[in-house]
Amino acid sequence: MSIAAVRPDLPLANVNPVAKVAATVPLSIVLVLTLDAVSATVAILCEIVLFTAIGLGPLLWSPRTLPVWIAAPLTGISMVLYGAPSGAVLWEFGIVHVTEGSVQIGIATTARVIAIALPAVVLFLTIDPTDLADGLAQTLRLPARFVLGALAALRLVGSSIDDWRTLSLARRARGIADHGAVRRGLGQAFAMLVLAIRRGSTLATAMEARGFGAPGERTWARTAHFGRAEWVVVAVGCLVAAASATAAIATGSWNVIWS
Amino acid sequence: MPAQGGQRISFPVPLSSKRKGTTVHATTTSSDSTVRPDARRLRWRVVDIVVASVIGVAVGVVFWAWGVVWGPISAPIEAVLPGLQAAPAAVWLIAGVLGALVIRKPGAAIYTEIVAATVSALIGSQWGGLLTIEAGLVQGLGAELVFAIFLYRNWRLPVALLAGAGAGLAMAINDLVLWYAGAAPAFAIIYTVSAVVGGAVIAGGLSWLAVRGLARAGALDRFAAGRELRTV
Amino acid sequence: MPTRDASSPRPASVTARGWGWRHGGRREPAVRDLDLQIRPGERVLLLGASGSGKSTLLHGLAGVLGGDDDGEAIGELLVDGRPASLSRGRSGLVLQDPDAQVVMARLGDDVAFGLENLGVAREQIWPRVTRALDAVGLDLPLDHATAQLSGGQRQRLALAGVLAMRPGIILLDEPTANLDPDGVREVRDAVARVVDETGATLVVIEHRVSTWLPVVDRVVVLGAAGGLLADGRPRDVVASRSGELRAAGVWLPGEVPWRAPRPEAAAGHPLLTAAGLDVARIPGSPLLRGADLRVDAGSILAITGPNGVGKSTLALTIAGLLRAEGGRLEPSAALADGLRGAPWRWRSRDLLTRIGTVFQSPEHQFLTGSVRAELEVGPRALRLGAVERTARVDELLAALRLERLAEANPFTLSGGEKRRLSVAGAIATRPRMLVLDEPTFGQDASTWRELARLIVGLRDEGIGVVAVTHDDVFVDAVADRRLEIGARRVAPAEHGDRR
């Protein structure tokens, strides 16, 4: 798991994260509005072509996107089984109604989840938390105390994972590791939380001692640019959204289901 | 005594006597929470921000680890459940309720839940990106509204359970609109009820228990939530 | 007087008049009735028993005790004549825990953090960052990951972060207590250089006096009941107040708190033998290869060596908690007591009567909400009857002076009490072998003495003790044998007489 820093040689690594997040917004809105396989499929194709073209292909096909490929069809299955029934009934069992309509919904749902999640996951993997914080505080002008507080808390991820490992060993040493995995896991999570909050309180003191949260204007050692590259990224996001919406409307499959 | 707007404590104390018992106490007694003006009661200190963030981060990490271990086993089972999968999904809602119960400031539930969501988005979750954070915002809002209805003055178990239920309801609405858009009414109802019950029990109940444990372990000595249970 | 950088700040003065502080939720004040003057440029070592409020004073000077929510102040505490709470930026504070002070992911960003908060213009920030890193001797790229720094490097980074802000007074709260001897020297030397160059006032808390004597020119001892116990030139205070300092747990230069008597009997039979053992914390990435060692009943084996060579991992492996990557680990029949195979194959419950483990940080071991319940965990897991259980627990509570804390929450104990409790928890099930990771690390001299006596007592009962340690005094005064581990490999054990 890499939460510390993103490899700076990745494509788009130097683009303001705010732009990368913003670029996914139009497509997400389009795909949330309509439930159809056409818009989602067009979007997926655009995503694959674009990511491959700019050199994010390896990331696209890496294990990091595996959860998307697993979760999407599983969500689709839920909808095949429990989607709104219509058309011919294929199978029935209790409240399960597999119909032609629900199979269509399942397929559309699968494509839709992939189309929304894939760019988000891939783009987030190119985002360095420090850059994200700079973007949120300088570009979007979110309150610096909160943004930086969250950023600082990320430093404790490493020590929390170490704690978790040691806590597991300590439970074996104390003779209680043979049974009751669930209860032990809860206790262990609690112990980790105690240690994390203690460390967090110390971190807060260390930050205050360095003037954090004091009155007065704060300056920034790093700049968060929002220039041409950022606008291009956002524009590409808009284009993909427009393409998938146009395709769905042109083929007559545009389908706003919860209007 | 003014102690707002970033001004820290000040020390206007008569120096005529230094002996114990005759000095004038410079500040009001901190345990007396009713007399303090609301503005100060509700203002976030640095330690509030950092500890809320730490709670969000810790919960985000636990869920990531939990997902790695149990996800592959549970996901196929959950896919065929008629909406009951919302109940275990309520573990996602712990961050917001726990954050609010510890910090006791407006926005704590929303902020903590958003931090947890952002962390899991950065590590890599199946939904990913902005919609993970959007889900965190909506779920946090569900809990936040309940605490706001009680004017950020009641932090007892019933309110914690309600806040968990509120977060569960918000999660269900969000998921049914965004991800299960084509669901049949039966699925939607089961999903919503599971989310509300799961939210109340897991996010509300477990968080409330965790806060008591944290307070007794002395981890919350800098918070009113900790001092209420532990004066030494 | 060394020449000063033109950009150096004016050294700050400190005045406390009848100052006191009570933390919110506490009945008793942490500090009371304090009167103290520190002149600009003085270098003060602050001593006192645990609970005398040294840290509270330092936090007060740094202006981080908080507002009305956090506690209650009495009297005056001034830095340069202004309330200390308003003088953030004039003072710089470094804390004890190296893991809890890093704010940013990259080295340069972390040093810049304080400057940003003070509103320093960007074009001035980076030159000041570079200069501060130079001053503490951290010769690494600005984008170096802070997660990869050693403990000593992290403390120097914290010092650089403080230094860049050009404080008039530098406040150090046990900055070296969590470091190995190399780290201690690194940080101490960096501090000495920095105060020489800037002329800043220095206040440092540390119970290992000898580390800081070369740097400071004044020693102040806080009394446990408030006020000052002693104040003066270092040599004078140490010489004239040695009794009080000893009672306060201060490590006096060149003094060993306690020496173990020779073992009454020669070392007993072997309990566990390791041959060519490869150990790994995370499966697949061995830290240390080819370790050979033998643990004997009734003998204390100290495992020493530099940080990061895998000493703790070796200890956890021979304790049966981690699976070895290679080599053999063979328990004797006396230790195995009917079980087969290496200890890591045994069930968790079976370890209880065979090998006890005391972790470096006691908190990792705590499972319950009270000291008594904590001691009952092992006996319960062994399914001992209630009578036997209570008898054992009462005996341990008395032997380790934890009786009055029986109902206290383990997490809320003092450092020394936590350490005693974690040892007590491990020996409640009467294991034949005990593995301790840094048992005396960072302890004051009183706790050290108590732990040393306890460990030697266990040895004399015939328990085989293994202690991973950085503590030379422990190795010298307590251990019977020593196994020195070099970088990436294991040196042959000295199976000689005690040194």
Image (tube, rainbow, N blue to C red):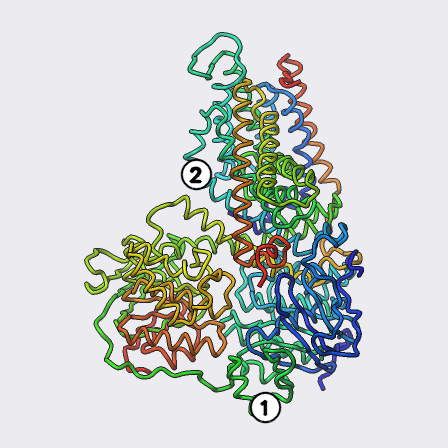
Give the image location of residue A26, x and y in percent. Answer: 68, 29
Amino acid of disc 1 = Arg
Callout 2 and callout 1 share a chain:
no
Left or right relative to A96: residue A123: right
Query: In which quadrant will I find the C terminus of chain C?
Result: bottom left
Give the image location of residue A258, x and y in percent. Answer: 64, 19
Query: In which quadrant will I find the N terminus of chain C?
Result: bottom right
Q: Residues within 10 Å of mark 1 (few under 14, many from 20)?
A: few
Give the image location of residue A10, x and y in percent. Answer: 59, 44
Q: Residue at x 49, y 50 (%)?
A: A190
Q: From mark 2 to mark 1, how far is it between C-alphas?
A: 62 Å
- Pick the residue in front: A64 or C48: C48
Label 1, on which residue? C235
* Element marked by disc 1: helix
Q: Residue at x 21, y 55 (%)?
A: C340
Label 2, on which residue? B70
Q: Residue at x 28, y 81 (%)?
A: C263
Chain assignment, label 2: B
